[in-house]
Each structure stands twice: as C-alpha cells, then as structure tokens.
Image: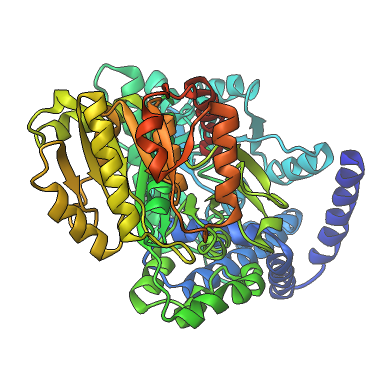
Amino acid sequence: MDAFLDGTGYWTLRLIAFWVRRLPLETSLALGRAIGRAVHFFSRRRRVAYTHLKAAFPHSAPRERKQWTRELFEHLGMSGVEIMRVPVLSESEINRYVTNHGYENYLELRQSGRGLILLTAHLGNWELSQIAEGLRGRPMTVLTRRQKHKQLDRLLSSFRQYYGSRAVDKGSGIRDLIRTLRQGGSVGVLGDQSGGKNGVWVRFFGRLTTAPRGPMALALKFGVPVLPVFMVRRKGPCHDLYFRPDALELVRTGDYEKDIEINTQRYIEILESTLARYPSQWLWGHKRWKRNRTQRIVLLSDGKPGHVKQSETLLEEIRAVGGKAAPPYEILAETVEVRFASKWRRRLFPVFALFFMPWAQGRLRRLRFFLTPECAERIEQVNPDIVISAGTRLVPLNLCLGRENLSKSVVVMKPGFPFNLFRYDLALVPFHDRGLLPRGTVRIQGALSPAGPEALESSKRKLIGSLPNPERVRLGLFLGGETRGFKLLLPEVENLIRQMEQASEAAAGDYLVTTSRRTPEKICRFLQEQLNENSRCQLCVIASQDRRPEVVPGMMALADFLIVTEDSLSMISEAVSSGKAVVVVKMSSDGLPRKHTRFQESLKKDWGVPVVSVGELAATLGKIRRVPAGEFLKRERNEIREKLEGLLS
C-alpha cells in the first residue's frame, strides 16, 4: 500500500508541476491557494494547528486562530507551487520577489572562511531560501529529514538541489555537513523541530520540550558562527528573507552539555519572537509538543465533595507518576467549578453537547447560553492537555473541552447513556456500576481513595494537636448525609451515638466523629449539643463548619475501628483502603440506588466487611478484624499508574 501511495503521489505531483510551470506565476499561486483551502477543509491537521496556536497565544481570540489556521494552509499550498516551479525560476525573478534584510552581514560571515551555520525554521517558504541562494551562485549544504515515501523524497531533493545546493539526510549525511564546515562552507539547518529522546530540553512557548542538539553542538565543537535566518511571505509571490544583524554570541561556560542547552534556548527565544509576528506561517500542524514534560491539567468540579476528592486523588497519582520521569513532568493543574445558568439548562446541555461536540473547536462561545458568565469565560480560556471529571453530569463538558483542545479525557464513574458509547483515554468505573462500559475503562473496587500511608500519617500529625488524649482513640464514626430518596432520621442517629458509647466503653477507649456536608442541620445541632461535653468523644467535626482536609484521613490513621454509614460509597472505599477494621452501618431509609447494595455485597464477599443495622453495631465491633484489602488495592493502584504513564507519554 505504501508503494502504491508513493507512486500515486509522485506522478500526481509531477503532473501538477507540469501545469504550474506553464501558467503565469499569479495564476499558479491562486491554484496553490485553492488547493490549500481544500486541504484545510478536509485535513485533521487544521485541528492540531488550531490547538497549538491556542497554546502559544492563549490570549488570541478563536476567530483569529481559525483565520491563522486557514491562512497557514493557503500559504503551504502556494509554497508547494513555488517549489514545483523551481526549474523555471530565474535570478531576476528571485531578485524581484525576494527582498533581503541583513544580507551584507550574511555575505561577510560567509566570506570569512570560517564556515557558517544558517539556522532556520519551518517558517514561510523555508525551502525557497536556499534555492534562491543557489540561483545567485552561492549554493550550500542543507540538512534534511528523509521522507517516508522514497519517490516523493527523491523528487523533493531534486528541487532542493536544482541550482547546486546539496541536500544531505540525518545520519550518514552529518559527515558531509562537517566536511563543508571545515572547508569554510555554509550549511542550512532547521532548528525548530522536536529533538526526540536525545534532544536538548528547552522551554518553547512555556512548555518544557526537546529541540535538536546538533546545530549548537557543531557550532561549539568547530567554532563556527550561527546565524538565524527566516523567510516569510509578505503577500502573494513576495517574500522577505531576514538575516539576523549579527551571529549568535555563543555562551561558553566550560560545561559542553550546559552550553548546548543555553545556546539552543537562546535560538528558541528568537524563534518565539519571530513566530509572534508571523503566526500564520509556521508549521503548526505538526505535533511539536509530542515529546514534552509540561502537562496542563484541568479538573472539572460539580461542587460535590466526594467527586472533587476523587479528581484530586487522581491528580496526585499523576503527580506521583510524573515525578518519576527524567526529567520529571511539570504538572500545572487548575480546578474549574462548573456552574450552569439554571437547572433546566443543565438538563438540556447533554442533548446539546451530543450534537455540538464534532463542531466544538473554536465555538465554545456557544456554551455561554448554558453556563454562568464567569464559568463560560474560564472554559473558553483553559488549554489543557488532560481534562479530569468525576460524576456523570460533567462528562459532556469534558468531551467538548477535549474536542476544543485535542486534550485527553479522563472520567471517574461510568458515563450515562449515550456517553458510555464514546471512547475515553481513561475511564475509572467501579465494579458495582453495570451496563455497557466505554472503551478505555479500568475497573476499580469502589471510589478512588487518597488514604495512602503517607497521607494518613501526615494528616494524623496535624490532627493530634486538636485532641486531648490521642493515644486513647479507638473508634472513628463517619456520618453521611441525605441524598435524593435517602433520609437520615434523628432517632436513628441518637441510637447510633448510644451504640458508639457502648462500643467505646467495651473497647476501653474514646471515639471521634465527623459529618458530611450533606448531614441535616438538626442532626448536626444534636451532635454538637450531645458530644461537645462528652468525655468519651474527643472530637466532633461538623463538615459544613470545619473543612480541614486532615480531619478524615487523620481520623482513619488514629482509630482502630472505622464506622461508616452506607450512603457514601467514596467514604467507605477510603476507609477500606486504609487497611483498618471497617463496619458499614445500614440506616432504615431504603432510598439508595441499587448500586449501593451491589457494593455492600461485594464488601462482604470479597473482604469480609460487615454491613450491620444500627442496633447491631456495638456487638459487631468486638468480632471484626482489619480489612484484608491491602494487596488488592495495591494491584489496583499499580494498574492505574501504568495507565497514567501512558497518558503522560
């Protein structure tokens, strides 16, 4: 198939070249512009170009970025036509349409006999710059990348070498490049591409990425000057060829590798300032940041503490994975709290998003109808590499952002229909969620839990200062709250506290209590009145009033027995992952979804976690052991980290 495509492309270009050489220049350029527009309409590369322009120029408007992208493809079409017309070019035509700036400096450096590296970029019609010099009788050696298709590669090389310049490929061609420099000749090198795994690390438009190390390595080793040069299209057939007024003054500290890094970064900064003046003429469509160590992550929040905690836990896992790379990843994270303009617009949004997603790029202004003004503005401005959301409500917005920024979509919990039919870069779905699962799913036992040993111990140290006798703590009660269909009744909570008193007396120790933000106010008042002067309860935290992050993990680290009401899957999962002895307390309300029952059955079957009524609590605490979940959860976390490694790469 590759040979067929190679041959077809070769003869197609030969045919186009035959005709454009026989057309007037303006007519052939108009044809090239039309071809560029057609390619822009059908090519996926326009989406890549738009995304990279947004990353490089975050304050530009979507309309500007779309215009730059269209102009880029038109420019590439015209550049292709110009290269095909190389055999009919003349020196007078070059002098007429190419205006040189700083040319005298270039000639002076060239005539010095020291050798010269002309460092350029995929900007304007970069191929035409060395062809123009060949026409003027000053051919050079140019370093090129061998193309995948051999016949097309030979055709392009023939255009490059038509007027005496010599094209050599990376690898064996480096010897020819060195020979040219030693003989005092000029070589042309592109220095804006990715340097691959062996490149030098630089910061390009704020992101840590690699650049080719070869140009500066050669310049430092052989003592030859480096002159940045850029060609840009002024209008139609007219170009400006800019030679820097003076060669780069290379930094030499004595540390060869450090010098390569410093001098390459200086060239990258010159390139950035040039691209800022001509944003529509660089090759934005290639994946310049494919190898980078800067990851921008956006966490979408629906305001639910359990969902926020799971997203933040996943973020910490990403930080842990990224910190092991060499060099380590820079994780730049921000949280966007998603606020809809009204309830009915929130309900309508998934239907809208389903049809809007394919056309979302450059059109996020349409979301202003659904979101509050502040939220819509932030959604338009963010430019993430990874979008994380927990819960089903934010999945449509996650996908829209992914389409706008070509970012990777990560969701926690199973997306609802029809969004469970989509593919995600990572979907973490609990075992108790049934039905058709999206592609890219990793099954997890319950909810992501931050309760690792380090987090528990750190929170424990912070919480101890709030307790009169931390060494006496034996029990921790995590009281949930009301949800749709599920109610907490005051008499039942009163009975639960009586059971805690009995269990505390039997265990010869004290207990700690914390509530959920969903806990009804009347129950919170009861707890404060009942427990603030209670000698056995060393701490009662009302979550709506005290939001210290160390409370929950600190309680888990201090207590030997963890008692959790059945309504909070995330809290149960966090308790189980701590490795402590866990009891799940069933309340009398039966309005919880079926998935809670499946989760409880899994706890009892797989780990032996008792699920008891309020009245059975005190008797049960004397019989249970620690949860044997450590190895399983360790394997689960390792699997997630493997997926995250692939996500970052």
For the point 63% across and 61% down, the residue is 416
* Image position of 223 with respect to 385: above or below: above
- Residue 440, by quadrant, is top right
Q: Is residue 423 above or below residue 326?
A: below
Left/right placement of residue 648 relative to residue 540 reads right
Whether 430 is drawn above or below 84: the answer is: above
Q: Residue at x 31, y 23 (%)?
A: 258
Q: How is the rendered protein coloured?
A: rainbow
Count of numbered labels shown in the rendering = 0
Quarter of the rendering containing residue 137: top right
Q: Horizontal placement of 103 versus 15: left or right? A: left
In this view, the residue in front, 385 or 370, is 370
Residue 611, horizontal then vertical, whole percent: 49, 38
Is residue 101 among what the camera can see? no
Residue at x 50%, y 29% (from the top left corner): 637
Image position of 533 (left or right of 320) = left
Relative to residue 331, is residue 134 drawn left or right?
right
Residue 239 drawn at (x, y percent): 53, 63
Q: Is residue 540 visible?
A: yes
User: Quadrant of the image for the N terminus?
Assistant: top right
Q: Nearer the viewer, residue 279 or 287?
A: 287
* 483, 140: nearer the viewer: 483
Image quadrant holding the C terminus, namely top right
Tell me where residue 457 appears, x and y as whole percent.
25, 26
Measuring from the top left, give residue 92's x and y in whole percent: 61, 62
